[in-house]
Amino acid sequence: MPDRLTHIVTRTGDDGSTGLADGRRVPKHDPRIEALGAVDELNSQIGVLLAEALPDDLPALLAAIQNDLFDLGGELAWPEQPQVGDTHLARLDEAIAGLNAGLPPLREFILPGGSRPAALAHVCRTVCRRAERRLTLLAETELLSPRLGQYLNRLSDLFFVLARSVNRSAGRAEPAWRGPDRAV
């Protein structure tokens, strides 16, 4: 990798713009930058989840997802260079199926919570959904690979199943929504 990252303070963004991988400069509020920022926030939130004690199989999965998100961000920054492919989606599908296989069927809506790692997985899920919304907004005006949206959609599903799995591993009940007639 070239040494372009040795100077973190470049001052080139002081005017409210930022550079894309293809050399173009755009405003920091550009929909592409909003999508990139949401993906970056998701990656950071996964880092927080990784700081928790997790079942042995999850850290490697989450690290792979962090790398996938870098690929996704790279494609957002340089759309002419596709980086997210079928293997990315297949990895998520396989992980979802594997995690879901050990869970009882859902009989009610669940609330975020239970154990701390499960609650953090739900935060990852909601940040992922925000990234997906930013991506769909961008896709209204710019041509994007459909795999980007497919990846984020499946990833949010993975975080839901992961939260359930983590709670089950920890022996924690999933907080259930009790409906509008619940006793306070």
Image: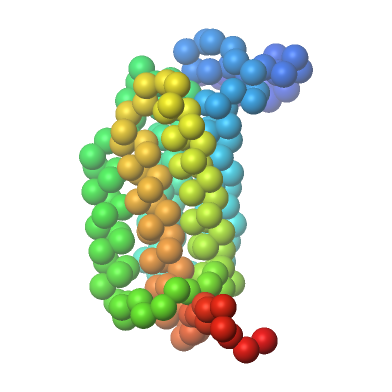
Q: How is the image coloured?
A: rainbow
Q: Residue 134 location in percent, x, y?
A: 51, 36
Q: How many marks?
A: 0
User: Residue reaching furthest front?
Assistant: 181
- Give x and y (percent) for residue 179: 53, 79
Q: Residue lying at the far bottom in this picture: please name it.
A: 183
Q: Residue at x 48, y 23 (%)?
A: 77
Identify which residue is drawn at 38% across, 66% down.
Answer: 161
* Vertical position of residue 17 compared to residue 88: above or below: above
Is 125 located above or below residue 115 in the figure? above
* Residue 169 visible in the current orientation: no
Picture quadrant of residue 51: bottom right
The image quarter in which residue 147 lies: top left
Left or right of 179 on screen, residue 11: right
Image vertical order of residue 74 relative to residue 155, above or below: above
In the rendered image of this protein, does residue 14 appear above or below residue 163?
above
Q: Residue at x 42, y 28 (%)?
A: 139
On the image, the x and y values in percent for residue 48 come to 59, 57
Q: Residue at x 65, y 23 (%)?
A: 28
* Quadrant showing the C terminus: bottom right
Q: Nearer the viewer, residue 37 or 132?
A: 132
Can you give x and y, in whole percent of width and height, for residue 2 in the image? 51, 18
| Left or right relative to 7: residue 140 | left
Q: Is residue 138 visible?
A: yes
